[in-house]
Image: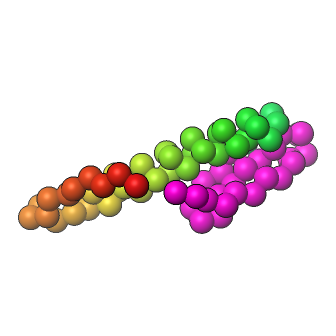
Amino acid sequence: MLFHVTLEKAEDGWIVAECPALPGCVSQGRDEKEALENIREAITAWMWAEDQKAASSLPPDRTPVVVAV
């Protein structure tokens, strides 16, 4: 999957990375490279957490099936 992210230099010099498509998915790094590595990890964690919430809310008569994207 592809996501657009924004990069913004914070007052303290760190680079803040945010993924607007995923509310609250924000990370940072000392430079652009590190910020991009960290936002990739944050996107993966965000999606995993959302999937876990969805799976745990399924009715007992539904069987979840895992699909790789």
Q: Residue at x 70, y 57 (%)?
A: 5
Q: Is residue 1 shown above or below 28?
A: below
Q: Is residue 10 shown above or below 2?
A: above
Q: Is residue 40 shown above or below 19?
A: above
The number of numbered badges drawn on the structure is 0
Where residue 65 sits: x, y (%)? 21, 56
In the image, which residues are magenta?
A: 1-27
- The quadrant holding residue 34 is top right
Q: Which of 58/36 is in front?
A: 36
Q: Which of 51/4 is in front?
A: 4
Q: Residue at x 20, y 57 (%)?
A: 64
8 falls in the magenta region = yes
Where residue 2 sits: x, y (%)? 58, 58
Which quadrant of the figure contains the C terminus?
bottom left
Q: Residue at x 49, y 45 (%)?
A: 45
Q: Which of 51/1 is in front?
A: 1
By what rule are the colours in the image chosen? rainbow
- In the image: residue 36, left or right of residue 2: right
Where residue 7 sits: x, y (%)? 79, 53
Q: Main secondary structure of the magenta part?
A: loop
Query: Looking at the image, can residue 62 be seen?
Result: yes
Q: Residue at x 86, y 47 (%)?
A: 10
